[in-house]
Image (cartoon, rainbow, N blue to C red):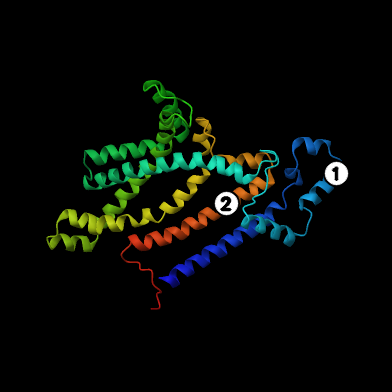
Amino acid sequence: MTRYLLSKLGQAIVTIVLVVLVVFTLLRFMPTAGYFSKEQYKTMTDAEKTAYLRNMGVLDPMPVQLQKFVSGLFHGDLGRSITLYPSMPISNILGEKIQYSLLLNFISWFTAAIIGMPLGIAMAKNKSGMVDGLGTLYVVLIRSIPSIIIHFFIQVFLSKWFDLPMLFYMDQPISWLLPIISMSIGSIAGYATWLRRYIVDEENKDYIKFATVKGLPKTFIMWRHIFRNAIVPIAINIPSDFLLMLSGSLVIESMYAIPGTGGLLIKSITAMDNPMVQVLVLLYGALSVLGVFLGDIVVSFVDPRIKLVDSNN
């Protein structure tokens, strides 16, 4: 087990290091205007701009800049925003915004799991029946109608029919309801679709037919064999889905005026805020790598065919 974990951890660390190097290098080719506020860039002379960049360390040799940046990361210093949130520490900006995205996305993910998975199981157990037909209709509608139209319908009509706030307020939990519905309906359809498919696939395999012939109870076969194997492809993505909640939802957070991290990267790129772009790209890259690593660990526990041991032993 230890050898397996160290191997996966080593791969994750190497990948993160490569992400840091690539992102750090590529951003050094971005226009230096991203290191100035609009007023500074307009009013400063070329000599003043050069002195300003030299004082920031932007003109230092690449290895020196990288060493300073990595050292700052280990000390919790992510730098400061320049154009988007002038002079504000990036760590403070992220700390303030992440709590909103994480709260709403976690509730949405939990809601999708407790609704979508039972729906997928019910659809598989009642294949070609009424439940399966209604579930399939729901999935088709969610997948075929553009999401922006669905979100608009939820915000405008559900708020009117049930007298719900159209905008998000942190101190009014009732105002969380519409954003959570908007965030979860797509995931509900996804969980239901894939779990139904995997369960049906498992039911048609020889070992399930053999277990049925042996006279094992249907409930035992479902939960001990079918569900345990069908959940594996879904479980492997759960850690990455959870970590990527920190990135928020651009469309939904904009619609409900949620002050989260959704769209923060796009706003930073548009504003040419180089330090902010650098931190966000590295953050999302590191979260993706960590999600894959945790997914490997999770699947080793839920999949009875995989053990956390070295294959050579």
Q: Position of residue 61 (x, y in %)?
A: 77, 60
Q: Residue at x 51, y 35 (%)?
A: 253
Q: Residue at x 45, y 49 (%)?
A: 241
Disc 1 + disc 2, Cβ < 8 Å: no
User: Looking at the picture, does residue 135 appear above or below residue 225?
Assistant: above
Q: Is residue 39 left or right of residue 161?
A: right
Q: Position of residue 52 (x, y in %)?
A: 81, 46
Say if residue 265 shows up in the picture. no
Q: Quadrant of residue 311?
A: bottom left
Mark 2 packing: few (<14 Cα in 10 Å), some, or many (20+)? some
Mark 1 lies on a secondary structure that is helix
Mark-to-mark CA distance, 1 and 2:
32 Å
Q: Mark 1 or mark 2, which has the lower sequence index?
A: 1
Residue placed under numbered mark 1 in the picture: 48
Q: Which mark is residue 131?
A: none
Please name whichever residue, 278 or 168, is drawn nearer the observer in this view of the structure: 168
* Kind of residue at badge 2: Leu
Position of the N terminus by quadrant: bottom left
Residue situated furthest bottom in the rendering = 313
Q: Position of residue 83 (x, y in %)?
A: 70, 39
SS at badge 2? helix
Q: Disc 2 designates what residue?
A: 283
- Identify the residue at horizontal 45%, vertical 67% (top origin): 5
Locate the C terminus by quadrant: bottom left
Which residue is drawn at the image coordinates 48% and 69% (left, top)? 6
Residue in front for this viewpoint, 171 or 225? 171
Is residue 284 visible from the viewing direction of this image?
A: yes
Q: Amino acid at mark 1?
A: Glu
Tell me where residue 247 appears, x and y as whole percent.
52, 44
